[in-house]
Image (tube, rainbow, N blue to C red):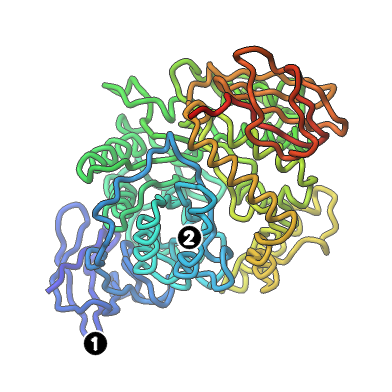
Amino acid sequence: MREFEVWAPSAAERVELLLGQERVALTRGDGGWWRAAAAADEGAPYWFSIDGGDPRPDPRSRRLADGPHGPSVVFDPTGFAWSDAGWTGVELSDSVIYELHVGTFTAEGTLDAATARLKHLVDLGVTLVELLPLASFPGVHGWGYDGVAPWSVHEPYGGPEALQRFVDACHARGLGVCLDVVYNHLGPDGNYLGEFGPYFTDRYETPWGWALNLDGPQSDPVHAYVVDNALMWLRDFHVDALRLDAVHELYDDRALPVLEDLSARVDALAAEVGRPLTLIAESDRNDPATVAPRGPGGAGGTGLHAQWADDIHHGLHAALTGESQGYYADFATPGALTKVLTTPFFHDGTWSSFRQRTHGRPVDTGHTPGWRFVASLQTHDQVGNRMTGERLSHLLPTGVLACGAALLLTSAYTPMLFMGEEWGASTPWQYFTDHTDPELAQAVQEGRKNEFASHGWDRDDVPDPQAAETVEHSRLDWSEPAQGTHARLLGWYRSLIALRHLAPELHDGRLDAVGVEHDLGTGVLVMTRGSYRTVVNLGDQECSVPVGTGAAAPSVLLAWEPDGTRLADGVLTLPAQSAAVLGPVATG
């Protein structure tokens, strides 16, 4: 016998379990919960029916073999035979993250196919693989942010067992796994939660409609829905970290809000399992309280372990590309690159022209380590939300890409790469969907065209999100890493990551110990990390940079243009659009 339960306070008279040809009446309990015991084998399909209405999948369905419009499937996540008993986890302070979209990482677009490419990630030197959202959604292709069943794994990717196999395989190779989870909204197609109870509230508005009901009447089970789900991935699927999407859209006025409660529960689980478990927030607030430790009486921070820092991306992007449209305008100003290399929030109480108001609060760089902030040159958002999904490799010469990599991978932050970045992939990563609702599909197609037409682009140049070729164009080409300039750039990334792992000063999180000198006239920037210096020349002329003589004289450890890079008499000569990392002469 199995126990079936569902929170359905909207039910007036009855809730039934539809199991094969049986209709089993559930018993009403306290707080809107309904329960029943029934004989059901692993893999058995089932539904719930409220007051005789249409059958609906379980809001906590662990498997949806036919997608979110189909029945739930009985799945016990504890049945997997794990081989990672010796896995001790990964510390974020020592990590390099790799962001990966399962559907386009390989031609097959599955978790098992991604497993076959793990050797590439190990050789690259990354330590934490971040998977874009896996929650089930209608259709086959999508970014994952329109998921409607947060407790399931998208079946075209392989379903929940494939995720367990993937995590186990990663751990066997020394890789941690971070799962991107979306709690601020559900997609519009296949979202049945509102039929069961008040999961959403019109008291707050988000870009996707009503907000999750985290602090209104009957919100306790909604709060638990989020916390229990997060703990499930960490406990039952052995995931090492969660990236929490857009936490600024989680409106919660409780004394103990859901994020603070979640951080405490995750820390307790980490102590129980004996390995680090990490929560990484995406937040638009530029508020250091997000990663500040929890305090008694709510006096401290939220207690999340880290957050994405988009300002760092924006500062690097503006400096490398020269783009100054939209929110890049503020980051194209003098001093912006220096600021974001030494503090994660460019807007720390300063005027934001994009928002037309002041924004953010300062970070205490003497006490808040840089590893709590995830920095990047490219992400799924920053690439995919461009009209044609251009990567930096479509916008910049390879030498400038090498400069960006040097700054990111020797910075005081936790660096994150977007899949294919490491070899300058020629494939774009575009916005693609596979909505099965014709009206929704048309609305998305027209919305995408209208968005870019409003900025002066030709509507006919906007890729059709629903077209098969859009997702096909976005798949990585795995023949590229072994070819010419791609192979050279990949070697550069590998060398930088290897040096970062070997040199403690290069992953020292002390932001107040980072020194930056930036000559805007020549495009030369020198970033100092203890006894290491990263020198980049973004200009189009060879440069000469004094780096010291005598006992403290450094040596050139890495150079993008080794034949043209010279160090003599305390002066580094660096070719145009190139970079070098200098450090102490190795001994022993």
Question: Does label 2 or label 1 sit earlier along the sequence?
Answer: 1
The kind of residue on which mark 1 rests is Gln
Res 257 → quadrant: top left
Asked whether residue 441 is in view, the answer is yes
Asked whether residue 346 is in view, the answer is no
What is the number of callouts on the image?
Answer: 2
Q: Is residue 153 left or right of residue 6?
A: right
Numbered tag placed on residue 425 in the rendering? none
Q: In front here: 61 or 571?
A: 571
Q: Is residue 214 left or right of residue 349?
A: left
Residue 199 on image: x %, y %: 37, 52
On the image, numbered disc 1 is attached to which residue? 21
Q: In front here: 516 or 282?
A: 516
Please tell me whether mark 2 or mark 1 is closer to you in this view.
2
The structure residue drawn at horizontal position 32% and vertical position 37%, both measured from the top left corner, is 263
Residue 359 on image: x %, y %: 60, 24
Q: Is residue 222 left or right of residue 117?
A: left
Q: Is residue 34 above or below residue 368?
A: below
The structure residue drawn at horizontal position 43% and vertical position 52%, both measured from the top left corner, is 179
Res 486 → quadrant: bottom right
Marks 2 and 1 close (CB-CB < 8 Å): no
Q: Quadrant of the N terminus?
A: bottom left
On the image, numbered disc 2 is attached to which residue? 118
Q: In front here: 141 or 18?
A: 141
Badge 1 marks a residue whose secondary structure is loop
Question: What is the C-alpha distance between the residues marked 2 and 1?
Answer: 44 Å
